[in-house]
Amino acid sequence: MNSEQTYLIRKEFAHLSTIYFNSAYFGPSPFRAKIKIEKAMQKELDPSFYDYNTWMGISERTRLQFAQLIDTSADNITHASSTSDIINIVANGYDFKSGDVVAAIDGDYPSNVLPWMVAQKNYPVKLELLKCDFPDVAWLEKNIPKNTKIFNTSWVTFDSGRKIDLLSVGKWLKSRNILFVVDATQALGGLHISRDELSYVDVLATSSYKWMLGPYGHAFGYFSDNAQKLIKHKTGNWIVSPNSKVVYNLCDYTTETLPGARKYDRGQASNNLSSACLTGALEFLSEMGLKNIQDHNHALRDYFLQNFPKNKYDVVTPPDHMANIISIKGKTIDPLLLETELKHHNIDVSVRQGKVRLSFHVFNTKSEVDTLIRALDI
């Protein structure tokens, strides 16, 4: 980070009261989000002369912000409430035929499993949960079920922090006409996604409240042009009608939708308060640049890996497939006891699946990592 970026980070996160290595649980919003929320609250308290187009245009402005962040078109972006909502759009909108299979990873986050469990009750599709620590191309070639139409997985897993290679896996799936659905919730915001990587993803879902540093109750979905052709819009929602743009035309009923992935938008996407928080987060991420953030996070991660007390802990995260999350296991200490011990040092972490999960993000510093390393040496 250069001096200007370092100053910006300190300014935006001076309010953090802990040494926070827990963005995989809940990402702290930058301070500018508070300022924007306070301004939005004034409109909530007194909406007098609040122009309709200004209000309803909030969702389009944040859509464009996110599209620019990942270098794609706003036509490929939709607003949702959660990652599960986006996976459900796919599960309910894909035209399944008898014998079709959806493949997911056993042990992945429930957002990538539960929608398909429900879908197989309602549509002629079978969910296959695959036992796999690392789904690379060699493994997929041997184990992907016949008649698989959709493969759904996390980019970075919530517990171990294992990262898949989007490019190689995406190319392999595309060569077999298998729709690639990716949960990027534990990645995007802390990781950069390249244009090449995104070109081989059909649906990308990311909740905004973790590494994206935004509000709870919001998620972005990316739908490729191909995915939009294959996944039907199956809900009635006035906000996605072209007539929603002109308040005087609301009763000119039509099932026509706004262009692109807007047809999947949730209702009331232009929520004043959550959108104000989201706008602040997106502005900050854009000013920093996802590639710069990724480089910073990886440098902190690597520094930790070089210096933590290796005689007392094992690293669970696969060394060749790491992102921003490192999961460790004490050789003798219980993870819940370790979490409590770290709290005594004002260090905030999570325990997941019997492992202590450490999340390195843009606001963390080398000095904070040193404090963490000393606290672990017990």
Image (cartoon, helix red, strand yellow):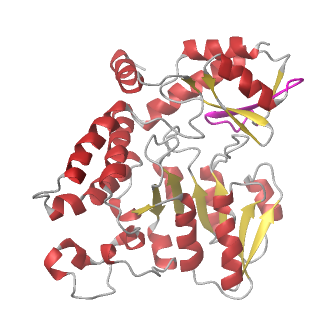
> Compared to 359, does 165 lie above or below?
below
Residue at left offset 79%, top offset 71%: 145
User: Where does the magenta region start and end?
Assistant: 318-333
Q: Position of residue 248 (x, y in %)?
A: 13, 79
Quadrant of the frame with the N terminus: top left
Q: Quadrant of residue 104?
A: bottom right
Residue at left offset 40%, top offset 35%: 289
Q: Quadrant of residue 170?
A: bottom right
> Compared to 214, does 315 lie above or below?
above
Residue that lies at the very extreme toward the left in this rendered image: 49
Which of these two is toward me, 267 or 219? 267
> Compared to 53, does 216 lie above or below?
above
Q: Is residue 150 visible?
A: no
Residue 265 drawn in magenta: no
Which of these two is toward me, 374 or 165? 374
Which of these two is toward me, 252 or 187? 252
Q: Quadrant of residue 25?
A: top right
Q: Position of residue 158 (x, y in %)?
A: 67, 45
Residue 319 drawn in magenta: yes
Residue at left offset 35%, top offset 58%: 73
Residue that lies at the very extreme toward the front in this rendered image: 45
Q: Looking at the magenta stretch, what is its main secondary structure?
A: loop
Relative horizontal placement of residue 179, taking residue 131 as reference (left or right): left
